[in-house]
Structures are given as C-alpha cells and as structure tokens.
Amino acid sequence: MSQDDSISILLVDDEATLREPLAEYLTGQGFAVTEAASAAAARSELINFQPDIVLLDIMMPGEDGLSLCRHLVETHNLPVIFLTARSEPTDRIIGLELGADDYIVKPFEPRELVARIRTVLRRVGRSGGAANETEDWFYTFEGWQLDPLKRKLTDPEGVTIPISTAEFRLLRALLDNSRRVLDRDQLLEMVQGRTAHLFDRAVDNQISRLRRKIESDTRKPQFILTVRGGGYRFAAKVQRIEPPRPS
C-alpha cells in the first residue's frame, strides 16, 4: 500500500491536456484525485467532498484561481498549491498572501510536484501518518487560546476571532518559537516552505494582519515585536494544554 493511499487531491485546471495526464500520474503515485475543469466545478465538488489538498491553476475562464484560493483557505481551511504559468514575483506574492502554501511554474516535472505535495501536507499535519500525541493540545497566551485542529482562535473573553489559514500558520510558527527572534526567511520557511527574499513583503503583510487580530494597539504591539535588523519575536509566555475530553 502506498504511503499516500489516504490522501485526496482536488485538481482544478481548465486545460484538459495537462489536467488529465497529471491526474493519471498522481493516481499512479497512490493519491485519490478528483478533477475539476473550472472554479465553478471545484465549488460544486466541495459541497460533498473535502480533499486534503488542492492543486489550482491561476488563469482559468470565469472565476480565476486567485479568487477560488481565497475561498478555499478562508472557508474550507484547505492547503493550496498553485499550478501557474505566471513566473513574475508579484504574481507569486499575491498568491502567497492569499494563503496559498506553495506554487509551481508550468511546465514542471511531475515528480517535483509530488515532493511539494508531500512537503505541504507534512507542514499542515495532513500527511496521513500517525499524529503526534500532543498535536491537538491548545496553545494559550495571556488568556488567548488557539485550537490547532479546528484552527480556532479565541480571545480572553472567549470570543472567536476569524483567522485565515495563512494567519493561523504564521501564529502557530510564532507560538512554537515564543521569545525567539525569527527572521523573515525562517518564518517564510515555516509558513510557506519558501526561503526566497522576494517574499519578505508577504511576511510583513501577514504580520500586520495578524497584529490587527490580537493586538490591542498595533502601533505598540505587546505580543508580536519587531526586532530591528532581525525579524520578529513573540514576547508572551506560551503554554500547551490538553483539551478537555468528552466524558
């Protein structure tokens, strides 16, 4: 049995000459692949189907991949890898800022795509292997609580704060390394799996959005501190606690 037998993929691309042979290749690698030729078809599939990861073309007729990506990461909490003919840094930055986990430029080597898929799935905890016994433990800091399985953030009053997939991954990276200075490359590797300096601005923008969610005064942050010339540091004490179990 393949290590990927339990992994399901939604492949969204309007170009049948790429989509169909790629679906066949991924199926041969042990993945369960569902195809969609448009964003509308993908939305229909998602009504009764929750894949582990989405492979998404950017340029499609009708709704494009960028719009669909925003929907996927905010509504379904799904990891996304862009399949794109666009190689300009600005296009990549936009995709990563929307919450995509990775991108691969067409034409690409299918074996590289499989490696990217497995890397993203490991990073988001959907690799199909045995879960770490503390994977579902809550993070707590100054009354705040983050549930890593539900990706649910609650403030000290118990109010749920909406958080995107990208913001969740960034916050979790900071909490896992509390009181440690992390530069942009380190954060980008933890959150997106990329280390190119071209995406420094994407990290800064995500930090700004996350601060608006958890800081009482973004001009004088108490949690996410900027370290001049270094990067960022999460200043609060972070604890991991076991979630309550049903009796």
Image: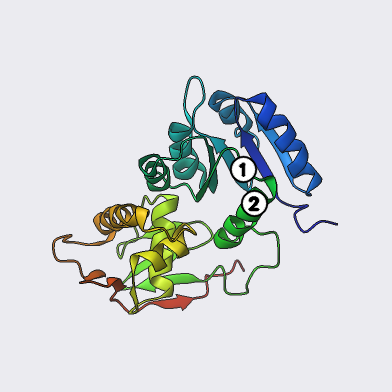
The CA distance from mark 1 to mark 2 is 7 Å
Q: Nearer the viewer, residue 33 or 158?
A: 33
Residue 131, position in %: x, y? 65, 68
Q: Residue at x 19, y 66 (%)?
A: 221
Q: Which mark is residue 242?
A: none
Q: Quadrant of residue 11?
A: top right
Q: Is 92 on the left or on the right of 27, as rendered?
A: left
Q: Is residue 37 visible?
A: yes
Q: Nearer the viewer, residue 103 or 133?
A: 103
Callout 2 crowding tier (Cα within 10 Å): few <14, some 14–19, many ≥20: few
Q: Which mark is residue 112?
A: 2
Amino acid type of the residue that numbered disc 1 sits on in the rendered structure: Phe
Can you say which quadrant of the picture contains the C terminus?
bottom right
Q: Residue most toward the right?
A: 1
Q: Circle 1 sits in a helix, a strand or a loop, which is it?
A: loop
Q: Is residue 160 visible?
A: no
- Determine which residue is flagged by label 1: 108
Q: Residue at x 60, y 25 (%)?
A: 14
Can you say which quadrant of the picture contains the N terminus?
bottom right
